[in-house]
């Protein structure tokens, strides 16, 4: 019998944006096990159910892609090809399309699960060398409204707080997030802090009574889409009671009067009626905030995924600004990232509307800085297609080739039947992934096998701006390659110079140099420091810096005036898809505790399937009774775009008039459970984030034809 000699490696969990540190042990057979890293400041050894079972997904190669495959033409099956052949032929296709139709005829759609170095090189390739800004990321679907909220109000996309503020806060307002299930280790820190300090107040805002509400002092259950009225109503009470920090407002903000006027224009009783939240609960929330010495607002997709997502961000962040709760211990507005490296993607300008190191695509000086740094003639000033705009451009035939990397849009984008038609319209589709189970593979003309999370090295940044180094633990199977290596090989096949990196460290060093002099400056943080000294929160401006836990401690913001900006919040209550007699219910979608995104990893782990193994529809008892639906009844959910069939779960934990579907299941499991068959294509006009939390639907018992 072989005695396994174990080796240990430090890395991070591949799932949510909490960014827990893990220790991976590898035996001689290359099997891995994981445990929480006791030295990691985020989790101090703790892991949630997904993290502690990560190795089961990583050890299981049954669905892995092992070698490149390509079609000779649309009607031919995928056939194995060499890497050289695949990349040369693809370079020829991309070059021909660009020559004939211009660079905007190609696009890349990447992921918040890419490492920072991968994000960096693919952005460099597309924006610097292909000559288009058509590169967007699935992070568009989860946090682009928060990016716009921070940028407009604070001057830059800068999360001002750190997890250590959790233990210093005495009032939490968690809005549109269920961290008990979706950011579990972070929520455990909140719970533990509250247990130690019973006076700490927890306010949760959610149309559903989620696990996060257990132990909350106050659960506000607004109708979807009405959040702005709710936060304004809380602000109104704070203003009326004089519980605002006028010194801070006067010295460090601008446009407060216009904001105040929009807030006081709506009587409290009207706001309470619109949100369907009792007036006394709104007063109670204001009282908790007024009494707090440290006030943290935390939010996620419930706010961001909205047709008014940016204004919801404005309304919530305004509560921190009017009370002066920003830039001091235990206080601040804290957008939680859903994906492990959504934040790293923002650092390298990973969205179609951004440039590296938080530079602006609209700013000619910034474009010149980046172009000179990369040694290219210039960068297009035209914003690229965002995620849903890529679908529209494919439909119109303007986008002819799309490269999909590390994401599964055929489960995650809204209105999936439309996405299928759009991808079918593409002349050439590249899918770069680890799993054969990705639904998107069925549209691929070229499949490129990528290395998994433990099979490559690089860095990631979590929700609190903390950069961690990820070690390579095992070799990728078959011919799979790290994503950065694939991108660089393709760039060289296109004839571009500047992609001859010898290691991920070399890419990181280049990215770090490009941040010099910016507000996210990490030029003092070498790759070697990250490997040997542990994690750091940016900025890290010089080699003596140990990082920056909290931003804006001097109350000088990144706007030209150095003052935070208020915005008037006078939008109508709801601009989502209208409810009608045919579609009278509001569908909201979201996650469950033990599954991750489109289940290509967590779906393989039997322990995780034990929690909830089938899709379901949550419906209020009154809505169910009105439709003759019993617990477990198979129901059809219809919208103007499609239908879904699952079993009903009747619960008074959801607001009447609202139904909930988990978003994880795709066609690979069953087409009938794809929540995004139903979802609306409306997006926020500023952030272009889809309105996943509000689609008009009807639910009926399923009758066999
Ligand atoms: Fe992984 Fe997030 Fe769980 Fe931490 S909280 S172990 S990062 S899924």
Image: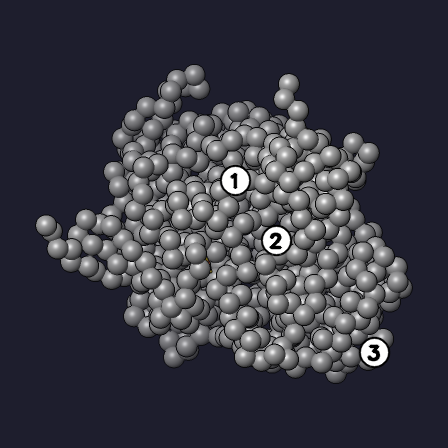
Ligand 1 shown in quarter: bottom left
Q: Is mark 3 within 8 Å of ligand 1?
A: no
Q: Quadrant of the C terminus?
A: top right
Question: Along the line of sight, which residue is nearer the eye, 688 or 77?
Answer: 77
Q: Name the image quarter holding residue 271.
A: bottom right
User: Which residue sits at x=39%, y=45%?
Assistant: 605
- Earlier sequence position, callout 1 versus callout 3: 3
Q: On the image, numbered disc 3 is attached to which residue?
A: 241
* Residue found at the far left of this picture: 1
Q: Nearer the viewer, mark 1 or mark 2?
A: 1
Of residue 106 and residue 442, the one placed in the foreground of this image is 442
Instruction: Indicate if the residue with disc 1 has its beta carbon within 8 Å of ligand 1.
Output: no
Q: Which mark is residue 614?
A: 1
Q: Nearer the viewer, residue 231 or 585?
A: 585
Which of pointers 1 and 3 indicates the residue nearer the eye? 1
Indicate the secondary structure of the residue bearing disc 1.
loop
To which residue does mark 2 refer?
A: 301
Task: Using the numbered discs, state the Cα–Cα distance from disc 1 to disc 3 in whole angstroms.
Answer: 49 Å
Q: From this viewpoint, which residue is outermost toward the top?
A: 75
Percent coordinates x, y for residue 456 in the rendering: 31, 51
Residue in the image at 81% along x and 56% along y: 276
Q: Is residue 267 above or below residue 102?
A: below
């Amino acid at each position: 019998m072989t005695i396994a000699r174990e080796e240990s490696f430090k890395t991070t969990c591949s799932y949510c944006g909490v960014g827990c540190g893990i220790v991976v042990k590898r035996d001689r057979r290359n099997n891995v096990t994981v445990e929480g890293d006791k030295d990691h400041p985020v989790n101090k050894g703790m892991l949630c159910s997904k993290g502690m079972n990560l190795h089961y997904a990583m050890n299981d190669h049954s669905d892995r892609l092992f070698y490149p495959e390509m079609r000779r033409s649309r009607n031919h099956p995928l056939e194995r090809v060499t890497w050289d052949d695949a990349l040369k032929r693809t370079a020829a296709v991309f070059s021909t399309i660009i020559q004939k139709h211009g660079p905007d005829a190609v696009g890349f759609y990447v992921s918040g699960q890419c490492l920072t170095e991968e994000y960096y090189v693919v952005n460099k390739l597309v924006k610097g060398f292909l000559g288009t800004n058509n590169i967007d990321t699935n992070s568009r679907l989860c946090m682009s409204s928060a990016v716009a909220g921070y940028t407009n109000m604070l001057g830059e996309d800068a999360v001002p707080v750190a997890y250590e503020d959790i233990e210093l806060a005495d009032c939490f307002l968690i809005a549109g997030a269920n961290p008990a299930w979706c950011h579990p280790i972070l929520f455990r820190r909140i719970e533990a802090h509250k247990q130690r300090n019973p006076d700490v107040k927890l306010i949760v805002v959610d149309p559903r009574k989620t696990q996060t509400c257990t132990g909350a002092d106050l659960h506000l259950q607004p109708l979807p889409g009405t959040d702005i009225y709710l936060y304004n109503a809380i602000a109104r009470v704070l203003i009326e009671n004089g519980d605002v920090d006028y010194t801070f407002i006067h010295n460090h903000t601008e446009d407060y009067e216009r904001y105040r006027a929009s807030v006081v224009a709506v009587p409290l009783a009207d706001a309470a009626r619109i949100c369907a939240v009792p007036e006394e609960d709104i007063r109670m929330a204001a009282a908790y905030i007024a009494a707090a010495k440290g006030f943290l607002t935390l939010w996620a997709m419930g706010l961001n995924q909205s047709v008014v997502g940016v204004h919801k961000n404005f309304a919530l962040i305004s509560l921190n600004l009017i009370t002066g709760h920003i830039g001091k211990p235990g206080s601040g507005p804290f957008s939680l990232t859903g994906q492990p490296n959504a934040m790293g993607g923002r650092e390298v300008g990973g969205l179609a509307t951004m440039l590296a190191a938080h530079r602006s695509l609209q700013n000619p000086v910034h474009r010149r800085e980046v172009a000179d740094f990369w040694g290219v003639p210039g960068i297009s000033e035209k914003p690229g297609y965002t995620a849903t705009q890529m679908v529209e451009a494919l439909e119109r035939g303007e986008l002819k080739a799309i490269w999909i990397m590390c994401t599964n849009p055929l489960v995650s984008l809204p209105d999936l039947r439309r996405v299928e038609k759009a991808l079918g319209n593409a002349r050439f589709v590249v899918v770069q992934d680890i799993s054969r189970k990705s639904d998107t593979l069925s549209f691929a003309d070229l499949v490129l096998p990528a290395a998994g999370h433990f099979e490559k090295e690089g860095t990631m940044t979590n929700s609190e701006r903390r950069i961690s180094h990820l070690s390579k633990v095992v070799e990728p199977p078959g011919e799979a390659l790290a994503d950065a290596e694939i991108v660089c090989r393709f760039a060289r096949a296109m004839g571009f110079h500047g992609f001859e990196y010898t290691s991920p460290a070399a890419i990181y060093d280049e990215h770090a140099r490009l941040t010099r002099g910016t507000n996210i400056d990490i030029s003092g943080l070498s790759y070697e420091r990250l490997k040997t000294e542990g994690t750091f929160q940016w900025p890290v401006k010089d080699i003596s810096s140990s990082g920056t836990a909290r931003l804006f401690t001097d109350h000088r913001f990144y706007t030209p005036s150095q003052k935070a900006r208020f915005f008037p919040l006078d939008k109508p209550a709801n601009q989502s898809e209208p409810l009608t007699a045919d579609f009278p219910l509001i569908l909201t979608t979201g996650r469950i505790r033990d599954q991750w995104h489109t289940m290509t990893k967590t779906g393989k782990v039997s322990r995780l399937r034990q929690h909830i193994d089938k899709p379901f529809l949550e419906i209020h008892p009154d809505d169910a009774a009105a439709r003759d639906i019993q617990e477990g009844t198979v129901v059809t959910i219809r919208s103007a775009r499609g239908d879904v069939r699952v079993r009903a779960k009747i619960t008074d934990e959801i607001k009447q008039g609202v139904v909930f579907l988990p978003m994880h299941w795709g066609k690979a499991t069953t087409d009938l459970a794809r929540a995004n068959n139903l979802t609306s294509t409306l997006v926020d006009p500023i952030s272009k984030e889809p309105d996943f939390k509000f689609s008009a639907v009807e639910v009926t018992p399923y009758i066999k034809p």
